[in-house]
Amino acid sequence: MSKRQRQIRPDAAEPTATASGDAPNTRMDWMTSVTLLLIAGGALWMIASEGMPIVFDVTSRDFSPVMVVPALFAVLAVYYGVRAGFSTLRLRKYGDSTLTADPLIPGRPFSAVVRTVRDLEPQGPYEICLRCIETVYTGGHGTDGRYRQSVRWEETAHVDAAGVRSSVGIPVRIDVPADVPRTTSLEGGPLTAGIRWVVIAKASLPGLDYKAVFRVVTKTR
């Protein structure tokens, strides 16, 4: 009995499963929040050690502009702490999702499957967004460096939740133009640009909405 041989294109690649970056990003947000709080506390300690009054009331005669420094670090710490808190709650509720996809090839349809740990029951369709993000280094050295992000291209597909078990897979197919940018490494330096592709999966649910972000690899033809 003859066996049929499977034909494989030279540029074909086996689909790879990628976990979302939510867990490491959440850990980084917690670390950032704690670090900023320590900096704010250290700044207050230095101000107090110099004999300056700890006054945040800008209308007070004892207020010093130097108090803006610990206040700013404290506000940033709260921001990252709140963001990390929501991400932690989302991970505990939905778990860490995975994306199974071929490398993105400009000019060809991008097909992928998003899988969740447990089945979801969204109050509407799933929103799967394929986005190209460019990060530009605008100057400075060390902590004075500034980065600017912009969306170079994106497309969102809406997948009807009826009959779809998210634990088995949410399939998506998005047409990608041939002239879109490819992934480049993020390097420090003046006007150095970095391009990355991500898939953002969303769904509206009671309480905390579902959201997961995945990195996508690009490939030339």
Image (cartoon, rainbow, N blue to C red):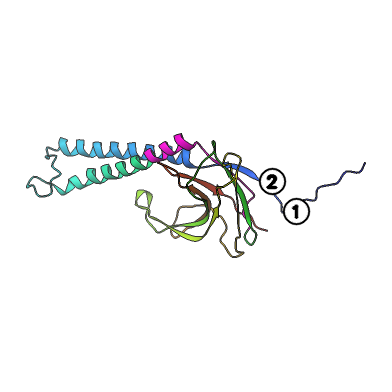
Q: Is residue 212 above or below residue 137?
A: above
Name the foreground residue: 24 vs 100: 100
Say which quadrant the N terminus sits in: top right
Residue 116, x across and y down, in percent: 55, 39
- Hey, which quadrant is residue 30 in on the image? top left
Q: Is residue 147 above or below residue 15?
A: below
Q: Is residue 174 above or below residue 44?
A: below
Residue 62, x across and y down, in percent: 8, 45
Q: Which residue is mark 1?
A: 10
Q: Kindly give the residue lying farthest to the right in the view shown.
A: 1
Name the foreground residue: 38 vs 142: 38
Residue shown at the point (56%, 52%) measured from the top left? 159
Q: Residues within 10 Å of mark 2 (few under 14, many from 20)?
A: few
Q: Which residue is mark 2?
A: 14
Q: Which residues are magenta?
A: 85-105
Specify the label residue 85 is tagged with: none
